[in-house]
Amino acid sequence: MKTIILGRSGLPVKPLGIGTEHMNRLSIKELDHLLRYCVERGFDYFDLVTASKTYRPRYGKVLPAVRSRVKIAGHLSDRTRDVANSEILFHQILKDLQVEYLDVLFIQWVDQVEDYQRLVSNGLLDLLAKLRQQGKFGALGISGHKTEVAIPAAESGLFDIIMHPINMASSAIATPMRRGFTGEDDRSRLLSLCRQHDIGLIAMKPFMGGKLLKPGQPYSATPVQCLHYTLSQIGVSMALAGVSSPQQVDALAAYEASTTAERDFSAILQAQNLLDGMRGECVYCNHCLPCPSEIDIALINQMHDEAVQFGISPALHQRYGSATPSAQDCIACGDCEAACPFGVSVIDRMQETIALFA
């Protein structure tokens, strides 16, 4: 599994992370086995979201065996945001987990504007700055479910990482180029801000709590389709999925070797009656492949959209330059446009991309 850099945190991690909340009911022996199995399958980021003082020490019994090979994210779950309580909780987390350092520390469950305003003004961030300076944790993050909080957090410059739900469900569609859906402009703005400010955006709930995986529903999807949708969104750095068994770990690991056809999520979006709303907009589903010139059309379109929205950074220019074949290899055969379920003018976009990066 390839390694990415988690925004300005500088953390090298895999683009699929492991959520541990569903592991809480496992025995210590099962927990030890599952953590080791995750590492063996190539996963190196573990989000220890549990707020329970009962569960944390159990992780402390098994984490030392894999600690040198993984990044660990802990969560300050005191919703009062009391500074003194938060400091006690932080040190208790380190003690329970039997670690001296957290790679990421999240301020957890910030879903109300008033809550956000309180934590940025009551001295909590000063405490965290002190702990960070002491070498107790690396990157500072904030997690929540509401864009009205995530957007000011992204604008503030205070956080290296934001964790926010992004998935294929119609209530949480997050394609930056989409328009016309409730809340879509806010989600697009959040994604744009994270990319502009190099904030690591961790997309939680890629399966919408498993609802997207239920068979027999018009929106039923596979894990690979869900993961590909989430990771295809401009601005997303990592998809974080909870597991509780080796079989679920295997389902995540299958993403890396999955085919273009297996990743194609266009039919799911059509089943949600969203086709008309995204007419002419590329959603990076790769339904247009295969290309006779072997161009990764979704990748080129994604870089086109990023260039239009944010300008061409040196990093984007380098990514485009390393894409082979690229837009200039398009032979304008039209196969892609005939296959595209969203009516994207692919040939025109290839020409626009050539001009943008000329």
Image: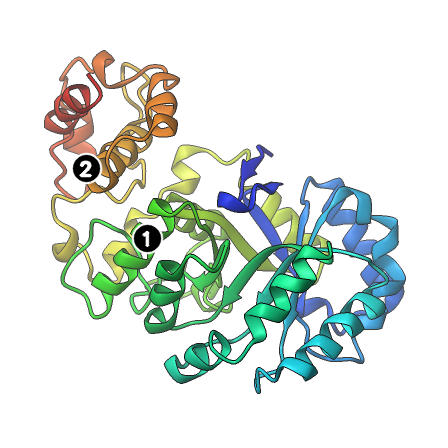
Residue 308's label in the rendered image is 2
Cα separation between marks 1 and 2: 14 Å
| Dot placed on the residue nearer the N-terminal end, 1 or 2 | 1
Q: Nearer the viewer, residue 262 or 70?
A: 70
Q: Residue furthest bottom?
A: 80
Name the kind of residue labelled 1 in the image.
Answer: Leu
Q: Amino acid at mark 2?
A: Val
Badge 2 element: helix
Residue 233 shows in this picture: no
Q: In the picture, which quadrant includes the C terminus?
A: top left
Q: Are marks 1 and 2 in contact (CB under 8 Å)?
A: no
Query: Residue 46 placed where, x, y %?
Result: 67, 55
Q: Which residue is pictured at 39% across the width and 17% down the height?
A: 322
For image coordinates 26% across by 62% down, the residue present is 272
> Which quadrant of the figure has residue 274?
bottom left
Residue 3 in view in this figure:
yes
